[in-house]
Image (cartoon, helix red, strand yellow):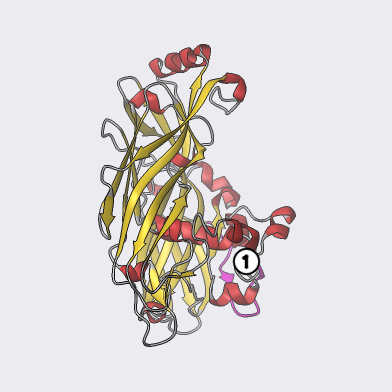
């Protein structure tokens, strides 16, 4: 058991700290920076969240996209307060976040989080409105399940890029007279974090481990790659330079035709796009035993692999899974078509050898797709979840090491 495993028995006190962004207001396309200083406290990310207000200008029958709370985060980066970057920047955090929430949240969850994460697409007031949202970061250092010793490097700097355009966050109803909001800005970005002061004997042990260069924290990053979906009978995509132990792979595509106008949310429809088979490869080895078939009536194996990749493949989780429209095969086929693979189940125990850049021949993944007929052009998103290990060293230094 880790000494940093959460337990009230090792705490002296807890305090909730509100940390404000460097500026009061932000426009689309700008970078938000929120310093989170820590002098003696450990951070409890499970009980922490981002909050902000979105200021929508006048519109006509426009809606904000579902899961708006996290959809504003295009790219996510975390640094020590001294300026050293922790791990890698997560590109297209928003597309990964929306995928996870759409596929794993049930209707009760959507109702409960409607006013926090903005789980449901919601009509905006024609005259403009200001709405508060919250978001719980789900990846990067925020995935640490234990107390995080942020005070050993003075604290954290959270940075993320806002999307560039309003139509990435809002859309119109079906009437051609509808108009998107005239403007969209953001105010009052704050990160509310639960800080913990631990008992002296625990703190002393942590200092000793750090001094001996034996203080490690495990966390999870997401590598996202965007590629063009070509109108071809087959499409292959290579994701290279993966630095970490691969946990899972997920792939979905958005057709250009579905987002050509302003009457469709950007991540609303992930069509099958004529995919009739797929296979994943890591290094020189195939992860799937053979090509997995996909059609309107042949979907069981593809859905089974998707559920495994999302850790949903047990009876209790399946009973709770109701999603948008119960995520029936029909819905999954047209609006939520996603491929998945849990690398921990790979042949040859391959996830034990897919690792950091030390393992040059296995730090890449290939996605191989075949199509029954030429697909509609669009964008394909590949999300690779990787386990990382952070070493915390004296002098406010951190480095990612092989786990």
Outermost residue to the bottom: 176
Left or right of residue 348: residue 53: left
Task: Estimate the x, y position of residue 387 in percent, counting from the top left.
Answer: 47, 42
242 or 139: which is nearer to us? Answer: 139
In the figure, 324 relative to 315: above or below?
A: below
Q: Residue at x 52, y 46 (%)?
A: 351
Task: Estimate the x, y position of residue 138 in percent, counting from the top left.
Answer: 48, 48
Q: Quadrant of residue 301?
A: bottom right
In the figure, 223 relative to 17: above or below?
A: below
Task: Estimate the x, y position of residue 34 in percent, counting from the top left.
Answer: 32, 41
In the figure, 182 relative to 118: above or below?
A: below
Range of residues picked out in magenta: 287-301
Q: Residue at x 36, y 87 (%)?
A: 177
Task: Estimate the x, y position of residue 24 in percent, counting from the top left.
Answer: 28, 47
The overriding secondary structure of the stretch rendered in magenta is loop
37 or 286: which is nearer to us? Answer: 37
Question: Does the magenta-highlighted stretch encompass residue 41?
Answer: no
Q: Residue at x 54, y 63 (%)?
A: 102
Q: For mark 1, what is the residue?
A: 303
308 or 336: which is nearer to us? Answer: 336
Using the rendered image of the protein, determine whether residue 104 is visible from the camera's viewpoint. Answer: yes
Left or right of residue 197: residue 154: left
368 or 81: which is nearer to us? Answer: 81
Mark 1, secondary structure of its residue: helix
In the figure, 111 relative to 124: above or below?
A: above
Disc 1: CA contacts within 10 A as few (<14), some (14-19) or many (>=20) = many
If the image is split into quadrants, where does the N terminus sit?
top right
Using the rendered image of the protein, determine whether residue 362 is visible from the camera's viewpoint. Answer: no
């Amino acid at each position: 058991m880790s000494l940093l495993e959460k337990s009230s028995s090792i705490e002296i006190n807890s305090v909730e700290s509100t940390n404000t962004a460097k500026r009061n207001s932000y426009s689309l396309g700008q970078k938000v920076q929120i310093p989170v200083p820590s002098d003696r406290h450990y951070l409890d990310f499970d009980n922490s969240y981002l909050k902000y207000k979105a200021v929508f200008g006048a519109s006509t029958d426009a809606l904000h996209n579902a899961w708006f709370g996290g959809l504003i985060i295009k790219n996510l980066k975390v640094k020590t307060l001294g300026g050293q970057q922790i791990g890698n920047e997560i590109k297209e955090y928003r597309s990964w976040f929306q995928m996870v929430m759409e596929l794993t949240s049930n209707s009760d969850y959507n109702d409960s989080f409607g006013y926090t994460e903005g789980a449901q697409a919601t009509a905006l007031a024609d005259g403009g409105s200001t709405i508060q949202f919250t978001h719980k970061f789900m990846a990067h250092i925020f995935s640490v399940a234990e107390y995080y010793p942020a005070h050993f490097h003075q604290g954290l700097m959270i940075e993320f890029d806002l999307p560039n355009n309003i139509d990435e966050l809002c859309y119109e109803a079906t009437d051609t007279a509808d108009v998107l909001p005239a403007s969209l800005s953001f105010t009052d970005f704050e990160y509310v974090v639960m800080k913990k002061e631990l008992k002296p004997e625990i703190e002393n042990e942590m200092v000793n481990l750090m001094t001996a260069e034996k203080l490690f924290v495990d966390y999870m990053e997401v590598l996202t790659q965007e590629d063009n979906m070509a109108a071809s009978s087959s499409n292959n995509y290579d994701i290279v330079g993966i630095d970490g132990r691969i946990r899972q792979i997920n792939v979905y595509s958005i057709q250009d035709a579905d987002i050509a106008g302003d009457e469709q949310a950007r991540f609303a429809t992930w069509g099958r796009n004529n995919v009739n088979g797929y296979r994943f490869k890591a290094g020189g080895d195939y992860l799937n035993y053979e090509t997995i078939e996909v059609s309107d009536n042949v979907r069981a194996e593809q859905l089974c692999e998707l559920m495994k990749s999302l850790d949903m493949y047990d009876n209790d989780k399946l009973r709770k899974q109701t999603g948008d429209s119960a995520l029936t095969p029909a819905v999954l086929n047209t609006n939520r078509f996603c491929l998945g693979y849990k690398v921990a189940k790979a042949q040859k125990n391959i996830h034990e050898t897919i690792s950091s850049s030390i393992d040059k021949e296995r730090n890449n993944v290939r996605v191989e797709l075949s199509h029954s007929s030429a697909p509609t052009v669009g964008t394909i998103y590949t999300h690779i979840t990787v386990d990382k290990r952070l070493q915390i060293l004296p002098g406010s230094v951190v480095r990612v090491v092989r786990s």
